[in-house]
Image: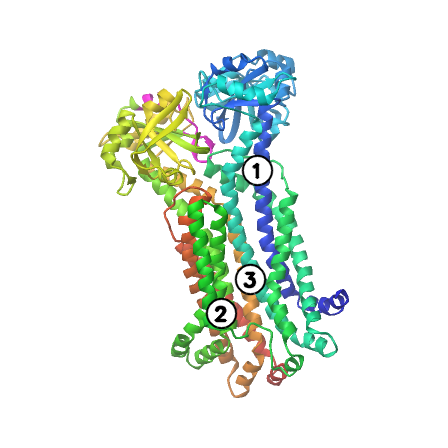
Amino acid sequence: MWRLLRQISYPQLRASWGRTALVVGGIATGVTLIVAISVVNTSVLANVQNTIDLIAGPAALEVTLGVGEIGFQETVIDAVRADPDVLVAVPLVRGTISVADDSNEVLQLFGADLTAEEDLQRYQVTVASNRREALRVLEDPDSILLTSDLAGRHGVNVGERISLSTPAGIRSFTVQGLLRTEGLAAALGGQLAVVDMAYAQALLGKEGRLDQIDVILRHDADVASVQPRLQGAVPRSLSVAPPAQRGARYQSILASFQAMLTGLSSLCLIAGVFIVYNTTSTGASHRALVMAWLRLIGADSSQVFRLLMLEALVLGTVGTALGLGVGVVLARLLCGVVSDSMGEIFQLRFTAPELAIDLRHQAVIVAVGIGAALFASYFAARRAARLEPLAVVRAEASTGNAVRMSSLRLIGWWVVLLAISCTALVVEARLRSVMWGNFGATLWNASIIVIAIPVVTWLGGVLTRVLPKFFGAEGQVAAASLLRSVTRAGVTAAAIALVLTVGITVSSIVASGRHSITSYVTDFLAADLIVSAVATEGGWLESPLPEQVAVDIRAIPGVKSVETYRAMLGQMFRGERIGIAGLSDGFFDPSRYPAGWYHEGDPVQAADALRAGTGATISTSLSDRFDLHTGDRIELDSPTGPVRFQIVGVVTDYVSERGTVLFGRRVFADRWQESTASRISVFADPGTSVDAVRSEIARRLGRTYRLKVLTTRQVYEYQLAHASRAFVFTDTIQLLIVIVTVAGIFDLLLSAILERRRELAVWRLVGADERSVRRSVIIESGTIGALGSVLGAAVGFVTAWIWVRINFRHLIGFYLDYHFAVGATGWYIALVMMMTTLAGYAAALRATREDVLEGIRNE
């Protein structure tokens, strides 16, 4: 086999290098995307776990509320320190600040009792200069430690001052020392600042609260014994667990996003596999004569089959290896993009300074890539091996896609695939299994391959009437050619429809996300002006502002009223990370929301309960995920103990992908001890200039805080930009779709039309001029493109609906309104029509330039 591969296959594959490259590229395209997504996911998760470990330092246990995003009372540390096996209990406070002159330069503020050098070293926070002096003066209120990289970017030296924007306003700090960008600082991408814990609490609006207590045990202490003892000593709402357990929680949070990316990349792999299938089929047709001569000189059918499969193995291995290499490079380019996308969706700040590669994942991808190449080549190899050699030599047989297939049989298979796909989606809804959802959606998408031929056959009668009517004799010839080879036309249309469906699905997910989230913001935050901080904690949610900002705005002449809204993520409910939001009374006015905002509950009755502090509304995602409805009771763990609400409504909300609980601002301040605001809605007096109010807000507060003062329209544009960032990784998927479309469609049509050289030569021989021949071929190829486009648009519409209305709910959690990407679909169809027309023109030009007698002889 290897000798035949070297002596026969290699020269032929080299001679048809374009088709060989397409086989390799088809596999490499799908593998590249899967590898890139796998590496990015692994890298982000590894860095999250590394950051958690570095923050925990040598701690065997840590005390947090949920995953550590919501603070709790600092008096808890006394109960922890009272345990005889606790050597050191280190309280920590964390938050987000930014450089005052550059809001894009966001830092993690790290506040702790780190006034000794050994305490800093426990957390791998190393002072690079003026070490002892920096530690001695760190307790001064305006002292800060910055990384040397950050200080260098902003031209700040030790002893100089830097202005930073904090939730408490703009503050000027004296840089008392520089931190080496290693350990924790490196894990945070160098964006680290360290201050005294008490000062950090004041800056972040967390007076009297902690985010985390790291527990370092005596060397002979038994963790398994200490953990339940500490759990009993602290409030029930708090968690006492090893740091690795918090990393596992984040891994479960991000698992849904990884599953979504994997599902989308698998669609691209299917497109690549089908391109390989068609390419190997047309390649086998062109090489049929060589295979026939092999049979005539003594090779049996099994040897021919093994030779073709060996070719597929080699090409699949090359394509997979190429995909692995390019995938790692793509992962490096995409790491920041996907991290941003994760941050937008989960409202967290992710960094991945170094790539992490899971060799087991890559081994599975290698097996999938090579297996896909073998599967795609199997059918063409089997047909080529079964042909009668003498019939091929006499030009009486072909191995191409012109083999007749029963339409009824294909429809039967399509019904079976459809039934399995529907069953998988039902199982997904019942079990909330993303695996079943990906399987069902992918199977439905792949069913295009089966139904395309019956569709073309059914439309054949229509084409025989329509094409001659509009294009005359050339149209009649084109229609006749399509009817003679419906299998070939159907397979080509299926290839077009397959890649078109993937593109439409991705674009529709993006469009649905953008429209749903921005519509929600426009309705929910509708006001004359909306005031918030410039910097964000991660994603789109701005850093909180003190309540005093709302008080100061309310005192400005021309301001009728002010409403405040505070959203917070990290609340744990039944093992899931959800969001909570405290709203001032004006947000509960039923008249401010459109019809359909309340999916359950009476808006008027709900408003009374919300204002009284006894009720809460929940998001549709939380309602569906935990089967909670109006009239049920919900209990949340707060820093001051359990809080119980009666559910008075189910509403649209996109604060958290796992669900949100919304209740009164006073309850939020009392039980969660939060008096800050994420956004402040400002309503001007009738007749008052909104621009004048905006200018006055900037004049009075601009020197103290870095504020955004936006109209509802501008907030809409802000949210739209962040929604676009959440799905920016899909641009890469769409680019790969375009590559596969351009290369695959061109080769398929070119090969299919060149197989008809004899037919075209005979037509010219009986008197047709070259222009008519070319026009007929272009009409035929354009018709195939149109059939593929219609089929792709129809199947894409359904596939996108499945992803938006079913898969996305279980993969990510958000309940999106379905918006079909009309503009993107039109662009894809225009691309398809352009490529099919160009392919038809190129094939016709080549065929008409060939001598007529030579064209007959070639067959």
Q: Is residue 537 inside the magenta stretch? A: yes
Task: Please determine whether, in this image, residue 632 is positioned above or below residue 771.
Answer: above
The answer to which of marks 3 and 2 sits earlier in the sequence is 3
Residue 759 % position (x, y): 55, 82
For the point 39% across and 43% down, the residue is: 815
In this view, the residue in front, 689 or 240, is 240
> Which quadrant is the C terminus positioned in?
bottom right
Mark 2 touches mark 1? (CB < 8 Å): no
Height in image: 842 above or below 276?
A: below
Q: Which mark is residue 490?
A: 2
Which of the numbered marks, if any, corresponds to residue 44? Answer: 1
| For residue 681, above or below residue 293 | above
The circle on residue 274 is 3
Q: Identify the residue at image location x=48%, y=55%.
A: 503
Q: Earlier in the sequence, mark 2 or mark 1?
A: 1
In magenta, the rendered stretch is 533-553
